[in-house]
Image (cartoon, rainbow, N blue to C red):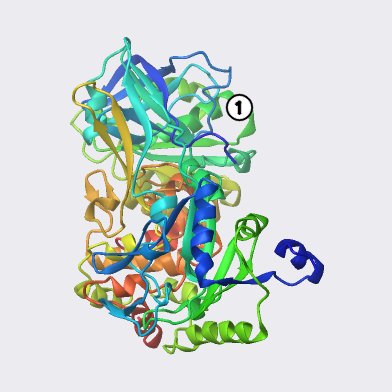
Amino acid sequence: MSDSPAEAAAETGSPAVRFLPRTELQTLLDELRRRGYTIIGPTLAQQAIVYDEIARVDQLPQGWTDVQGPGTYRLERRNDEAWFGYVVGPHSWKRFLFPPLFTVASAERTERGWKFQTPEDEPPAYAFLGVRACELAAMAVQDRVLRDGPYQDPAYARRRSAALLIAVNCTQAASTCFCTSMQTGPQCTAGFDLALTELPDGFEVEIGSDRGAGVLAACATSAVADEQRRAAAALRQRAAEQQTRPFDARDVPELLQRRLTHPQWEDVGARCLSCTNCTMVCPTCFCCSVDDVEDLVTGAVERQRRWDSCFNPEFSVMNGTQVRHDTPSRYRQWLTHKLSTWHDQFGTSGCVGCGRCITWCPVGIDLRAEVDAMRESAP
Amino acid sequence: MTSTDPWRIHAVEIRSVTPELEGLFTYRLKLTSPLPRDAYRFEPGQFNMLYVPGVGEAAISMSGDAESGGGWVHTVRVVGNVTGALARLQVGDQLGVRGPFGAGWPLAAWRGKDLVLVAGGLGLAPLRTVVYHVLRHRGDFGRVWLLIAARSPDRLIYRSEYADWEQHDLDVQTTVDRAPADWTGTVGVSTLLLDRLPLRDPAHTHVATCGPEVMMRYVARSAENRGIAPDRIWVSLERNMQCATGLCGHCQLGPAFVCKDGPVFRYDRMRPFLAVEAL
């Protein structure tokens, strides 16, 4: 038997799986930093679990969990010391791969006119720690939108190719989770460098790439005992079983196209505050605007791209008039894009079932309920 | 696949400004740095993003000759901040251009066919690229009609060129909503002209239209009544465009990014979405 996990995998033909003791997680972080990665992981801030730069395991939300429902998010103490015993918070990795504010071009005055430049920034190589299955799926969606189409967002592509992904399988689900319906989770099956399942005394680690194997090689790992393997599988299964609300997404793309004038849009539009929260927390929403920001001293101009939202009234303005002039039409744009026309545009749903739009909606609109209402009655 | 950054801006200099109407100007723009011979190549129906630094960008359709190589030609109506700032620039001033972008008119599909071009107001600007193409390749097309509608005779743009176009065997017809006493031409909407056009063979006739959306829907209806199937009717649509590359989301109409999948669309593909209010 070989010592190298990657070689072991090649020999057996099955994914290489190792056991990483709890005490070795810090070694993993140290190795990532030694290799020049900027580690982004879950932290506690503003009464939520959010993603931020970390260097030490004591910055992780140890012993905390999140309780979520429509319009509700609350942290609670766990009765154990799990580091990854929560689901997802308001942040997604989108904010690092597709920054909320980014200079796409600049203009400098010259003697006769203007000199234009597109800055080639050198982003940090990120190591994301704690990526959930639905978030891996969201990255795959954004890859199609921002990287793999006829036009590429170069800033996204640079960040994405440098990023190392350490996924952590969910071992529980929130009431807002529906990854099983969207077939994006809860188990991480592809797209990661390492995938961890947290056990009381350590992690079952699945190696997804040579890069992942290289990082893990710096840690003292051991073979996974059958008992540990069974325990990890049972925890992952729990995250699936806790998703009890049925949502049949299969025919939704066609269904919504038949419901473009359904009265339910008025109904949900009367509740929706058009606040843009759902689009800001969504890990796949990519809408943005570019504004000119001028330095009043030098006259130099930066073209700054910022996240925008189809819920903003100005979003659809054409020749001074809003094409989508009320909240029902804006909600319809968001939901039909996310669940229906995204398929036409990118060959996939724009929804990964993470439930953030439900949790962070201030009035608790659940997109699943809106679809169900339109399914039940013809217009 | 493009390998270049979609946000890359080219500096251009204004070489000429031609006032067309009040608040409507035609600009000829030339790149400031030496570029390859085909630098100004575009497909009729495409558009550029014109950029006034410190103000912003506006999507403006090409309205010049795609094969002249003499620079970008754009006819711009002053409607907002960017076009307003553009109107304050003069010959010799510089601005930025990104482009060309979008899917243009399907010239290959039109070869050997009769063609009805229907323009409303400034909608003639993107259709003029087709006119210039037809003039250069007149033998590729059968009969070609150009139906131009404007609010009043003094709102007809490019009027000095109509005689030349007619000499090249284009049947140019005009109509206006309101006419002064000395107007001897047609009064009424563009479909009035289309309804009575002596089509030879509707099954081999294509219609291309650009103008207000409501006008284009009526043009399409009229064309269908004349036996021209909706898969041979082409419309040039307009929406809020910011990135021009399908990456910002603003211009969506149903499944389409108007900037990237259009602005020229086959009518039967967009009709269901144009029919829904505020989509």
Q: How many numbered discs sit on the rendered protein?
A: 1
Quadrant location of the N terminus of chain B in the rendered image: top right
Residue B41, given in percent of the width and then of the height, sits at 54, 26
Residue B224, given in percent of the width and then of the height, sits at 48, 56
Which is nearer the eye, A159 or A112? Answer: A159
**Snapshot quadrant of residue A290:** top left
Quadrant location of the C terminus of chain B in the rendered image: bottom left
Q: Is A51 situated left or right of A21 in this image?
A: left
- Chain of the residue under the numbered disc 1 shown in the image: B
- Residue B5 in the image: above or below residue A363: above
- Residue A109 in the image: above or below residue B259: above
- Residue B141 in the image: above or below residue A76: above
Name the amino acid type tagged 1: His
Q: Are there few (<14), some (14-19), or many (20+) residues within 10 Å of tag 1?
A: few
Q: Is A13 situated left or right of A314 in this image?
A: right
Q: Residue at the spot x=26%, y=68% of the render?
A: A328
Residue B204, given in percent of the width and then of the height, sits at 60, 48
- Kindly identify which residue carries mark 1: B137
Residue A372, given in percent of the width and then of the height, sits at 38, 84
Q: SS at mark 1?
A: loop
